[in-house]
Image (spheres, helix red, strand yellow):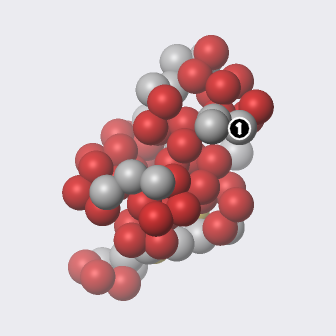
Amino acid sequence: MPSILAKSLENIGFTRNEAEVYVALLELGRGTVAKIAERAGINRTTGYNLLSTLVQRGMVSSSGKGVRQEYVAES
């Protein structure tokens, strides 16, 4: 069941999965695609696509490269 924050994000234009990924990232603080996808309840491949979209929108930033790449939610 989506959280109140996830529903609010959907109301301002996020897709349901984008909202769930963003909320998961807020809960984790920072994390790899695998950790974020697990927390958001999506598969890892979908996680890469959603995080890429959120990075392009400026909602998420990334650091590192390859397997050790981590993501952080921006305010």
Quadrant where the C terminus lies? top right
Q: In this view, does 17 lie to the left or right of 43?
A: right
Residue located 71% across and 37% down the image: 3
Q: Is residue 56 left or right of residue 71?
A: left
- Tag 1, which secondary structure? loop
Q: Give the labeled residue for mark 1.
A: 3
Quadrant where the N terminus lies? top right
Residue located 30% across and 62% down the image: 44
Q: Is residue 36 above or below residue 31?
A: above
Write down the quadrant of residue 69 in the picture: bottom left
Camera-side residue: 66 or 37? Answer: 37
Q: Is residue 31 above or below residue 37?
A: below
Is the residue marked by circle 1 packed among few (<14), some (14-19), or many (20+) residues within 10 Å? few
Residue located 43% across and 60% down the image: 37
Residue located 39% across and 67% down the image: 33
Kind of residue at badge 1: Ser
User: Where is residue 41 shown, x and y percent of the image?
Assistant: 46, 54
Q: Is residue 4 above or below residue 12?
A: below
Work out whether residue 67 can be spotted: yes
Camera-side residue: 63 or 32? Answer: 32
